[in-house]
Amino acid sequence: MAAFVGCGANGTVTGMVTANGEAVDSGSLVFQPIETGVKPAIGYIGNDGTYAMRTAGDEGLTPGEYRVLYMPPDQREDENGRPIGKPPKWRSYQGPAETVNVVSYENTIPVELEKR
């Protein structure tokens, strides 16, 4: 029987998002794969700073290197497009410059946002 090389199991990714040592309580993360042909993943950040990544079809992330992008929450607007309330606290932050490595099965990856 032939063995299939490189067909490892997909990984799950969870973790905590922080900025300046404080839990980030809103927005979402996108894990953008470095390798072409690999699905990106998205994770929504909870009020406690935790996140869990999901892919389309929810089959887990392909092992490999990913760039981490932070998407701050949208500014609330009235029917005329004027901002309502305070702007989102984390809007001037972005994902870390270094990539993250996802391996098969379970991954816990803390994400520290950086000021733009």
Image (tube, grey):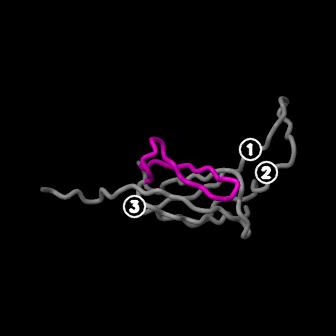
Discs 1, 3 touching: Cβ within 8 Å: no
Q: Position of residue 17 (x, y in %)?
A: 65, 61
Residue 15 is left or right of residue 73, and the answer is left
Give 35 or 62, whichever is nearer the viewer.
62
Judging from the image, what secondary structure is the residue with disc 1 in? loop
Left or right: residue 22 compared with residue 99 = right
| Mark 1 neighbour class, 10 Å CA radius: few under 14, some 14 to 19, many 20 or more | few
Tell me the distance, in whole angstroms, between the alpha carbons under discs 1 and 3. 33 Å
Query: In this rendering, which labeled residue sits more in front, label 1 or label 3?
Result: 3
Q: Nearer the viewer, residue 42 or 65?
A: 42
Going by the image, does 28 lie left or right of 109? right
Q: Quadrant of residue 19?
A: bottom right
Identify which residue is drawn at 83% across, 29% down: 79
Which amino acid, by three-letter code, is at mark 3?
Ser
Q: Identify which amino acid the numbered label 2 is placed on.
A: Pro
Q: For the point 63% across and 58% down, which residue is it?
A: 50
Q: Residue 112 location, x and y as percent?
A: 65, 66
Q: Is residue 60 magenta?
A: yes
Image mark count? 3
Q: Is residue 72 magenta?
A: no
Distance of label 3 from label 2 (alpha carbons):
35 Å
- Judged from the image, the secondary structure of the residue bearing numbered disc 2 is loop
Q: Is residue 101 above or below residue 69?
A: below
The residue at the far top in this view is 79
Near-viewer residue (46 or 30): 46
Judging by the rendered image, the residue that carries numbered circle 2 is: 88
Disc 1 residue type (three-letter): Asp
Per the image, the residue denoted by label 3 is 104
User: Where is the C terminus found, in terms of image quarters?
Assistant: bottom right
The single residue placed furthest to the front in the displayed view is 48
Give the magenta part as a residue range: 38-61
Circle 1 sits on which residue? 74
